[in-house]
Image (cartoon, rainbow, N blue to C red):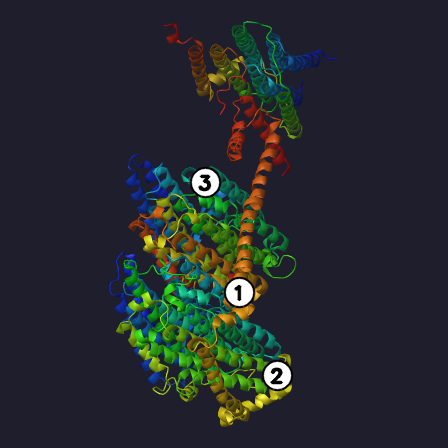
Amino acid sequence: MFLSLMIFIPLLGMVVVLLLPRDQEELARRVTLGFTLIPLLLAVVLFMQYDRSASDLQFDFDTVWIKAFDIHYHIGINGISVTLLLLTALLGPICVLASWRNIEKGVKAYLALFLLLETGMIGFFCAQDLFLFYVFFEVTLLPMYFLIGIWGGPRREYAAIKFFLYTLFGGVLMLIAIIAVYIKGGTFDIPTLIDLASREGHPLADRTFQIWAFLGFFIGFAVKVPIFPFHTWLPDAHVEAPTAISVILAGILLKMGTYGLVLINFAMLPKGMELFCNGEGRWGNAFAVLGFVNIVYGSLCALAQKDFKKLVAYSSIAHMGFVILGLAARNESGMNGAILQMFNHGVISAMLFLLVGVVYDRAHHREIGGFGGLGSRMPIYTGITTVAFMASLGLPGLSGFVGEALSLLGAYDKFPKLTILSTIGIVIGAAYFLWTLQRVFLGQLNPKYADMPEINRREIVTLVPLGILTIVLGIWPSFAMDMFNEAVKGLIAPLG
Amino acid sequence: MSVVVLFSIILLCPLAAFSVFSLLSLAGRNSPRQDLISTAAMLIAFVCSLLLFVTANPENPDHQTLTWLPLESVDFSMGFYFDSVTAVMLLVVTIVSSLVHIFSIGYMHGDPRYPRFFAFLSLFSFSMLFLVVSDNLLGIYIGWELVGLCSYLLIGFWFEKKSAADACKKAFLTTRVGDVGMFIGMMMLFAKFQTLALYGEDGIFAAVSDLGAGDLTWLSIAGVLIFCGAVGKSAQVPLHTWLPDAMEGPTPVSALIHAATMVAAGVYLAARMFPLLTPDSSLVIAYIGGITALIAATIAIVRFDIKRVLAYSTISQLGYMMLAIGAGSYVAGLFHLTTHAFFKALLFLGSGSVIHAFHASHQAHSHHDENGHSRGSEAPFASFGIDPAQDMRHMGGLRRKMPLTFVTMLIATLSISGVPFLFSGFWSKDAILVEVLYRAMSWHSVHHYILFCTAALAAVITAFYMFRLIFMTFFGEPRNREMYDHVHESPKVMTVPLIILAVLSFPIFNTIVNKGFFENYVKTPEQPHVGSPKHAHDSQSQGVLYAQAGLSVAYAAEDAHQHHDDHAAGEHHNPIHDKAHNIVIPLSFVIVILGIGLSALFYYWKKISAEAVAAKFRPIYNLFWNKYYFDEFYNGAIVAFTVASSRLFGLFDLRVIDGIVNGIGFTVRELFSRLIGWVDNTFVDGLVNWVAQITLSVGGRIRRVQTGMIQNYLLIILGGLVLLILIFRSL
Amino acid sequence: MELKPLVFYVFALLTIGSAVIVVTVRNIVHAAFSLMVTLFSIAGLYVFLQADFLAATQVIVYVGGILVLILFGVMMTSGRLDMKLKMERGQLFWGGLVTILIFALLLGVIRRTPWNVQEELGTVEGTTAQIGKAILQSEFLLPFEVASVILLIALIGAVLISRKEVREDE
Amino acid sequence: MNDLTPYLVISTTLFCLGIFAVLTRRNAISILMGIELILNACNLNFAAFSRFVTPPDDISGQIISIFGIVLAAAEAAVFLAIILAIYREFSTISPDETDTLKG
């Protein structure tokens, strides 16, 4: 029930916000902030209460939802989902704060859609029933479409439609795979299905079936992650979306893809995974190659960007490549690294997008070359940006490094050549971030921005928690890793 | 006090000093007394290091770890390791750092970002100390990158200057290339040993000695890759180009980071990795060190920027240390690291003192003193792209104006030139030459004498250009009278550190920088394959190992034999070693006399015109002047290639990948509208923007269902019903 | 050949034939008259089913009421009795296809269903009284009343809908 | 004639002809005629079942047929009223052209 509370409080908030009088925008914002703070509070309790020594589901709740098809409302969390759940709950209020002043039209609708989105995201990470999982997956789609399509930049409609169609395309393939799994397994219950799939001789454990189902799910999630070549919606969506939505997009929505890969493809379809990750045969390197391509391709594309936000978007693609590479390794360090990287990327990319938003709100453009010398005008902003950039380019002592390094260390075991090639991404990553830092902050101050106001308190409040998390996780990653380490052990145990 | 507590204090003091600054500035406040906080923190760290050095017993290394990541199959622990090397490094770092802090109080006075400078220095000190005390590769890597960050921040301290902004980026990126190599090496070791810890029973060093003969090549590759990190950080060829540019940073930074500590971290790493180094990887290290020493020295001859000369000198000296490590002389390498840290810091701080004086005079001269940090913005005379305050062609005769600076710098110069017996540099340089020669002799391979020759040649050149610097700066007639008139000696807060460092450059006055003591204190660790400690009796397997390493079996046997000798009687009673020693000592005199004499001929007595010689050897001069065209090569080839390929990829992404996606969207839309077009082909979309077309077509598709014709609904309902019945019938 | 089956088949053919004409003929007045034939023939079939009251009702209500109503409608709306109906090809094709499919399906159902046909077919001497009793004394009383209410509603509704707007007159 | 099947075939044919009319005719009154055909087919079915399937003394089928006729009358009245109203409004009775439901 605890989790249900977390899922549906934002939904309740949505109803409340919609019922508020039209002209009470400030009140609506406060109410929304309150309704996003409650899940955060619950998440803190969850963080305290969560039993870190157990690898199975906790806060389990199961009741029949649609009897005819044996669909259950089954929610529960394991170590991997709880990490992302905490991230979602944390980013909620931050995003509300980040959109406090720069959303002007249709504030109520915006907030209501945002709350719906939060419900979808929290529900997605809790769902333990395949159908429920799919429902929440799609629930996030709709508010996102409107949030980009109504409150976005000049090309918002194009971006929104592209995002929508892309994800829908992946979602349909996923739905087909879900139905196939249901027909073979006879149930939608994810833990049961995982169990069945591990039983030799069960139709669900059939290798051919697993490979096809794997592909269906994989493409569905690959669009979300996004994995090359399904990534082109991401830069457009990011560039057009308002700041807070970019944060959610990069922080949570991309993680839905990788989380799905872990929960479904990795745990439920091990034989499919085996084919694409064992490093042998024609397809054995496929997964790792995708990770490598994501890293290097994303980094190189980021280096070429002139738009600040697009650069961050492409860097996201590169960072998700490390997750893919870590998952492909299928060993303890690789998996832990991948999941840590998921969390860290959520935090860091959220910071990056918030930071871009800060400068965009002031200058009303994002051309990297159009700034210059902001370092002398906005020292605090520059400092925070430097921290975020350094974390993103994988500076040790900040969280980005740990996930990246663990993923690479794990992957080297299986795919030495690909991993060595992937390290090129580290250098290019440093190159584009430093180059951006130089173009925006270093050098003579651009006289156009001689009276640019320094970052204000509200913006600092949105950034500081993430910054602290970045530093804390960089120094003491066990803080997060304790949460999912047992779950990861459970995942890789069948692999021997 | 126990080692742990002292370590904690040493690490936490600088970190706390930095935290105070960052928290205050986040709250929007200034940290008014940051200079005192940072300096005090550093002094405390220094006292603790001294206490450690005095009290702790280096014979009995202290090693503490705690689990960093709770993984089962692999080991990730963090910890510290305290042995004699750690003790020496701690002392060196804290001494130089403290002195640089004090010097900076004077040097950076009046800078608008004065507190920030000290905060960054503190962060750097913390990182460097963390690097030094770490017991595992991951910890070293963390410290490694953090010092790189601090270096970045401090080189770009005056980031309004484009050259500084470029230089800091270049420094970070170039070292990152080396770091990636190091990371790959770490991955190799990790994949093999499932740990990155170096010491302890499960550590890499323990595991390495159990490796079989087949792993020798693998180990060599891993060793060289780890060494890549050192190549980047210690500015060895081919990744040395960032260090001269790094001189764009404030001079105290150059002294601390780019002369004494951070760049020496590469040497420290190579020394720490000593037990991993196979003959092959040692050879690579030795050659890279030797080449670097020579190339950097030759470039230094023709520089006019006082800091650039020192930068190339640093590169050259670091090459020396690498050469020593590669030649198997752990002690000599570390000893040179220590002595070099002091005299090079002294040289930099001395040059800082000169620059400071010149700047003050420049400001007094041009009555333009509101902008303390806009250096070089107004050049009153031809600058050749060099900051006039750093151009030796504008100096001269300064010994009369700045006697303290002159004397201390002269001592450092004598030290670096290796003037026999009195100065620390002699002992360390001499040790390296002896070791290299000894190694060349015992390798029985004539071509390894090249190493000794480069080392000796580099020593001559070093003496030459260092005295060129002294002669041009402090002797002769002032070349720029206006500036000269305004120059005066630096304040005490700047000269006192110079004096202390000068004292430290004399081995007589202290026991730390004393060769004999150092050799007793720092013990060479065993190199499993080179020193053959474990399998010495098993000559069969040794033979195989060395055959694979490409070395003669005879040498292997001899080396093993020798090791026994070393253990039995100590190094000095080795006949070959003695022979090497006997050659090198007289040679040192020759080197010094040759170097200083030539320099004096050129620049003191002016018997030979440097310009004439340069004109005569124009191609060589051009080669030196253009730094062997490394920068041109990197900018023209690697940077250009990367940027071009990134553009290509960016366009590819925009046009091809996205084009395919849009194309598919377009095709699907077309097909779909054709498909239903024959049912109702009246739908014509006259929209120019096909973006909006998608919207419309989606809407249109839904709308077409909504024709308002009841009969159509009925038809569809009935048809659907029939279909459903048919479907269910077939079930 | 007995007369009864012959008459039955005549009625059956009349029903279907006239219905086909109703559906296919272009002139709407012809269609209406053809419908009258259909309705009469169905009344005849009712007689064969020994449902005399039903047959009478069919004649009175359908032929006397509904058909006249339809003719009125035709005349009032078009003003021309020979109004041509247009048919579209796509509509014809799809409608025909669906119709044929439904027809085939229903025939299949008729053929396959094991109809529980009574062994003894009793003969009833006029059902009027029985129907009267059934409606007024058994469970059909309430439906009967409801039907009357519906008729009333339809009456009022029809008047309301078809009369001209009062406001327009004013 | 003493069997159920002929009646069912007749009613099915009527039903399908009615459906065809409803689906294809463009004139509202023709559609109404089609509907009448469908209703008649149903009534015929009820009567036939009442005769052959239910016991001889049970005449519920016939009664339901009567109800059907009643409803058909009511429906026809309302339908024609609507047609008249529409005709007045649009001067046409082709359902194709009264497409105000079109989205």
- The answer to whether dots 2 and 1 both sit on one chain is yes
Residue C124 percent location from the top left of the image: 59, 16
Using the image as rendered, state which of residue B519 and residue A18 is in the foreground.
B519
- Which chain letter goes with mark 2? B
| Helix, strand or loop for disc 2 | helix
Residue C60, located in which quarter of the rendered image? top right
Q: Is residue B515 left or right of residue B613?
A: left
Residue C71 percent location from the top left of the image: 55, 7
Which label lies toward us, 3 or 2?
2
Q: Is residue B660 left or right of residue B390?
A: right
Disc number for residue B630: 1
Spatial separation of the CA atoms under disc 2 and disc 1: 30 Å
Using the image as rendered, state which of residue A125 and residue B426 is in the foreground.
B426
How dense is the environment of label 2, judged by Cα within 10 Å: few (below 14), some, or many (20 and up)? few
Disc number for residue B548: none
| Helix, strand or loop for disc 1 | helix
Toward the front, the furthest residue is: B607
Disc number for residue A145: 3
Query: Which image quarter is the C terminus of chain B in?
Result: top right
Q: Is residue B48 above or below residue A202?
A: below
Q: Is residue A377 above or below residue B508?
A: above
The reply to whether the C-beta atoms of the residues labelled 2 and 1 are less than 8 Å apart is no
Residue A21 percent location from the top left of the image: 29, 35
Q: Identify residue for label 2.
A: B446
Q: Evaluate whether residue A42 shows in this view.
A: no
Which three-letter amino acid code belongs to the residue tagged 2?
Val
Spatial separation of the CA atoms under disc 3 and disc 1: 52 Å
Which three-letter amino acid code belongs to the residue tagged 3?
Tyr
Toward the right, the furthest residue is: C1
Q: Residue at x 56, y 12 (%)?
A: C58
